[in-house]
Amino acid sequence: MKYRGGTNELMRQASRLQRRVEKRREELKAETMEATGGNGQVKVVVNGAQELVSVEIDSELLKSEDLGMVQDLIVATANAALNISREKVDTELNQVTGGMKIPGLM
């Protein structure tokens, strides 16, 4: 019978941990991270759900460069912002779980 009680307690702990992970995920959706490229001429902001929030492009960049280069700069800066967001989310969720990689939670 003790084993059964231990299993129940383990399930309760897993459930609490899952609620904490989900709560932190929701909080991170509201947080924004940004990256800049082209010496600050492109700024991309994303949130903790890895969604694009905004893109700012210096008008001087559009005057002085070809379209293909500007597009590449936007893509590179957006990818950098998304990487920052993923790393932050991973770090934050690792803190919540104590570094445990639990299938279905992460």
Image: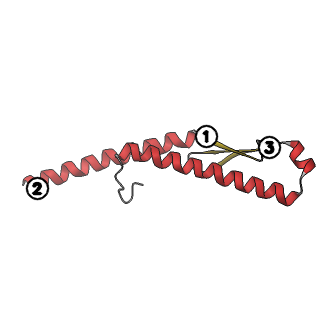
State the residue at coordinates (61%, 40%). 32
Which residue is at the front of the view, 38 or 27? Answer: 38
Which residue is at the front of the view, 12 or 35? Answer: 35
Give coordinates of residue 26: x percent, y percent: 50, 43
Q: Mark 3 points at which residue?
A: 41
Which residue is at the front of the view, 104 or 75? Answer: 75
Is any atom of residue 51 visible in this view? no
Image height check: is 41 above or below 69? above
Quarter assignment of residue 54: top right
Give coordinates of residue 70: x percent, y percent: 82, 54
In the rendered view of the protein, which quadrant contains the C terminus?
Answer: bottom left
For marks 2 and 1, the one nearer the N-term is 2
Judged by depth in the image, the label closer to the viewer, 3 or 1, is 3
Give coordinates of residue 49: x percent, y percent: 56, 49
Image height check: is 98 above or below 105? above
Is any atom of residue 32 visible in this view? yes
- Mark 3 closeness class: few <14, some 14–19, many ≥20 residues within 10 Å: some
The amino acid marked with disc number 3 is Gln
Disc number placed over residue 32 in the picture, else none: 1
The amino acid marked with disc number 2 is Tyr
State the residue at coordinates (58%, 48%). 84
State the residue at coordinates (76%, 53%). 74
Determine the CA span between mark 3 and mark 1.
19 Å
Judged by depth in the image, the label closer to the viewer, 2 or 1, is 1
Q: Element type at marker 2? A: helix
Determine the CA span between mark 2 and mark 1.
45 Å
In the rendered view of the protein, which quadrant contains the N terminus?
Answer: bottom left
For marks 3 and 1, the one nearer the N-term is 1
Disc number placed over residue 3 in the picture, else none: 2
Circles 2 and 1, Cβ within 8 Å, touching? The answer is no
Judged by depth in the image, the label closer to the viewer, 3 or 2, is 3
- Mark 1 closeness class: few <14, some 14–19, many ≥20 residues within 10 Å: some
